């Protein structure tokens, strides 16, 4: 029996509603494959911030260090400014544990209608490889002359040779095991220092992967192509902000942001990686038990894969495919009336 220590951070809003289903799925598939999970759950959240003045304790990152992987729900809720909650919990975890790859696979499942005519089930199968620790998400900058007519805000973007190289290499390696195509998201026509540097490094790294074809698209045109012809894409590599936007767009193309999984990976395995749905805390539906748990469950499957259990991950992905293709039980985001629990029950029955 293999044992894995999993740190659970349900966080805020529907984060607390979608993690228990993911845990139930892990336990069920674990029983079948001889994998045991021991969970440590942390109540780090906006609620904690409001009562204790911090999203997590001072030694929070040290505690997480002991885990084999982290499963996170969502962070951020009205009442605490987003930049405070996110930079107090989610972003420090990604950065401290060098989770520089944010892997966001997107498929159009049979049984889920894409809002797009151009995206029939089975045709769209792409992965957004998002740079996850630098780029536009930087602490460098500031605000001056607050409250005056001369007020200004500056936010620096930081691309390092090492940071861009490693994410681009990851994308090319991933593409080599898939359909062999990388698309790089750029904006070097308008952003004249960082994006040309990004483009140069992509071209440089591409030369080392002759078996993979590649191209680059301006982010504005790329957004349009995601809508017009999403099936053309295999691996899309993008900076932190561009990847963030593209991954919600791609999830919507696949029918709902509620079904999109992600992994914040430390590929070198020096530190635990974190698995988190693409969506946020959804305050508009929180507390009603109607959130779609598939983003969290798919993230648990990515975690199983990362922990060295591809067969178990496969079983979970098959159950996701089956519940959508073979039943008409759906949460509201997919046009149904099922609650989170009813939907999870159905999926567990198929596992
Ligand atoms: P959101 O993803 O929370 O919600 C966007 C829309 O999608 C809402 O209408 C919501 O109801 C719907 N939705 C999202 N997940 C769903 C699910 N599983 N099932 C059904 N419907 C779902 O994005 P937002 O409104 O921009 O952000 C809300 C809060 O979450 C903010 O504080 C934001 O900063 C935070 N956030 C956190 C993360 C994270 O922790 N990884 C990611 C995104 C946003
Ligand atoms: C995501 C989220 C976060 C991000 C926010 C909440 C900081 O949108 O994980 O996609 O931009 O990384
Ligand atoms: Mn996002």
Image (tube, helix red, strand yellow):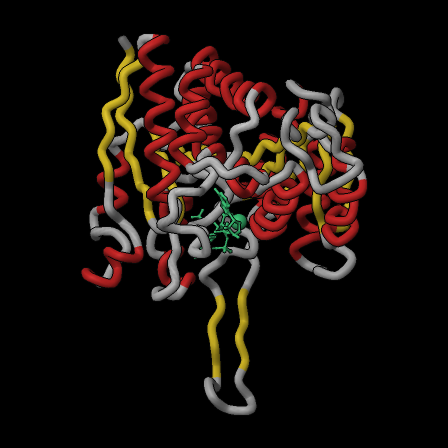
| 301 shown above or below 82 | above
Q: Is residue 295 left or right of residue 176?
A: left
Q: Residue at x 61, y 50 (%)?
A: 245
Across and down, in percent, residue 181 comes to 74, 28
Across and down, in percent, residue 241 comes to 58, 52
Across and down, in percent, residue 187 comes to 73, 54
Q: Does the rendering let one see residue 145?
A: yes
Hey, which residue is sitting farthest bottom in the picture?
149
Q: Quadrant of residue 324?
A: top right
Q: Is residue 275 left or right of residue 162?
A: left
Across and down, in percent, residue 77 comes to 38, 58
Q: Residue at x 46, y 31 (%)?
A: 299
Hey, which residue is sitting farthest front in the picture?
337
Pick the residue in front: 1 or 151.
1
Pick the residue in front: 229 or 327.
327
The quarter of the image holding the C terminus is: top left
């Amino acid at each position: 029996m293999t044992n894995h220590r999993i740190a659970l951070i349900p966080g805020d809003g529907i984060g607390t509603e979608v993690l228990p289903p993911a845990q139930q799925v892990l336990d069920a598939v674990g029983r079948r494959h001889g994998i045991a999970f021991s969970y440590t759950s942390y109540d780090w959240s906006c609620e904690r911030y409001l009562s204790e003045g911090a999203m997590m304790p001072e030694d929070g990152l040290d505690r997480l260090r002991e885990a084999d992987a982290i499963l996170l729900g969502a962070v951020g809720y009205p009442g605490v400014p987003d930049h405070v909650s996110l930079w107090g919990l989610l972003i420090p975890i990604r950065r401290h544990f060098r989770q520089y790859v944010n892997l966001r696979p997107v498929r159009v499942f049979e049984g889920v209608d894409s809002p797009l005519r151009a995206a029939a089930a089975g045709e769209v199968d792409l992965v957004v490889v998002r740079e996850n620790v630098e780029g536009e998400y930087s602490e460098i900058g500031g605000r001056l002359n607050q409250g005056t007519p001369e007020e200004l805000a500056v936010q620096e973007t930081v691309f390092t040779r090492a940071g861009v190289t490693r994410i681009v290499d990851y994308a090319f390696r991933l593409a080599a095991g898939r359909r062999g195509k990388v698309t790089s998201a750029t904006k070097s026509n308008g952003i004249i220092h960082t994006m040309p540097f990004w483009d140069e490094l992509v071209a440089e790294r591409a030369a080392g992967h002759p078996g993979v074809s590649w191209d680059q698209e301006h982010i504005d045109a790329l957004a349009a192509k995601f809508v017009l012809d999403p099936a053309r894409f295999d691996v899309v590599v993008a900076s932190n902000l561009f990847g963030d936007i593209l991954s919600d767009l791609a999830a919507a193309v696949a029918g709902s942001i509620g079904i999109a999984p992600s992994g914040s990976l430390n590929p070198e395995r020096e530190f635990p990686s974190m698995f988190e749905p693409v969506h946020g805390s959804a305050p508009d539906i929180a507390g009603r038990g109607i959130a779609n748990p598939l983003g969290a469950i798919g993230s648990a499957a990515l975690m199983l894969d990362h922990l060295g259990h591809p067969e178990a991950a496969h079983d979970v992905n098959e159950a996701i495919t089956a519940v959508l293709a073979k039943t008409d039980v759906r949460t509201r985001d997919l046009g149904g009336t099922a609650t989170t629990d009813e939907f999870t029950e159905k999926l567990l029955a198929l596992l």
